[in-house]
Amino acid sequence: MANLKSVLFGGLAITAALLVILPPSSEAGGCGCPPFWTPFGDNCYRFFTFKNVTWDAAEMYCRSFSVPCSETRTLSLGHLTSIHSQEEYDFLRVLYDTTRNKRVTTRVWIGLTDEDVEGEWRWSDGSDVTFTSWGSGQPNSYGGNQDCASFNYEFDYKWNDLHCGIENEFTVESFICKLPRW
């Protein structure tokens, strides 16, 4: 939508257009995703890369994003992504492949953890665990302290449990945040 406004500048009338640009993922009715977020289903996703990021730091970063929920007038916080179907997982694999640095193999934190109770995996957004894609022999809590889940393409995108901190045996440099669409 453009608003035209004439302005006198040095005695000359200059007409300027004020453009209202909507994010590419916006839809009529105010529903959509924030800029730089990718929609899928009822949610928005964004891939981030930070050197040696812990699971907790990635979760806190995701929580720094929020969207107003116009129907309930409450604020909805982002979280590390939860995954509830093969279709959603396939979408996240494509998002990962198209946005990651191709020169560096990165593991991706997802919002799954059993930090509170060993063996009882839960999503950081509080949703039910209805889908998993663990690699062979995973989760194994190797060394007794692997409580956070990740994936990467080297292991056919299968999930692996890792130590949640930066002292894990693998470098985790990326994560995917998830927000509800607004």
Image: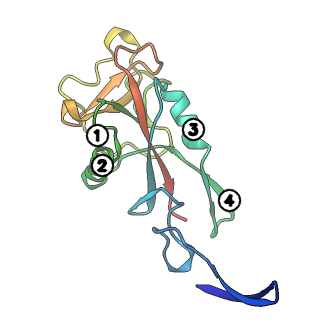
Q: Say left or right for 73 vs 134.
A: right
CA gap between label 3 and label 2 equals: 21 Å
Badge 4 or badge 2: first in the primary sequence: 4
Vertical order, 27 against 174 (above or below): below
**Location of mark 1 (residue):** 132
Vertical order, 163 against 80 (above or below): above
- Whether pointer 1 and pointer 4 mark residues with C-beta atoms closer than 8 Å, the reply is no
Quarter containing the C terminus:
bottom right
Q: How many marks?
A: 4
- Whether pointer 1 and pointer 2 mark residues with C-beta atoms closer than 8 Å, the reply is no
Badge 1 or badge 4: first in the primary sequence: 4
Q: Colour mode? A: rainbow
- Whether pointer 4 and pointer 3 mark residues with C-beta atoms closer than 8 Å, the reply is no
CA gap between label 1 and label 2 equals: 22 Å
Q: Work out whether residue 94 can be spotted.
A: yes
The foreground one among 138 and 110 is 110
Density class for disc 4 (Cα within 10 Å; few <14, some 14-19, many ≥20) is few
Vertical order, 176 against 73 (above or below): above
Badge 4 or badge 3: first in the primary sequence: 3
Observer-side mark, 3 or 2, equals 2
The foreground one among 82 and 178 is 178
The foreground one among 146 and 109 is 109
The x and y percentages for residue 53 are 48, 26
Quarter containing the N terminus:
bottom right
**Location of mark 4 (residue):** 74
Observer-side mark, 4 or 2, equals 2
The x and y percentages for residue 39 are 41, 61
The x and y percentages for residue 157 are 23, 37
CA gap between label 4 and label 3 equals: 20 Å
**Location of mark 2 (residue):** 98
Observer-side mark, 4 or 3, equals 3
The residue under label 1 is which amino acid type?
Thr
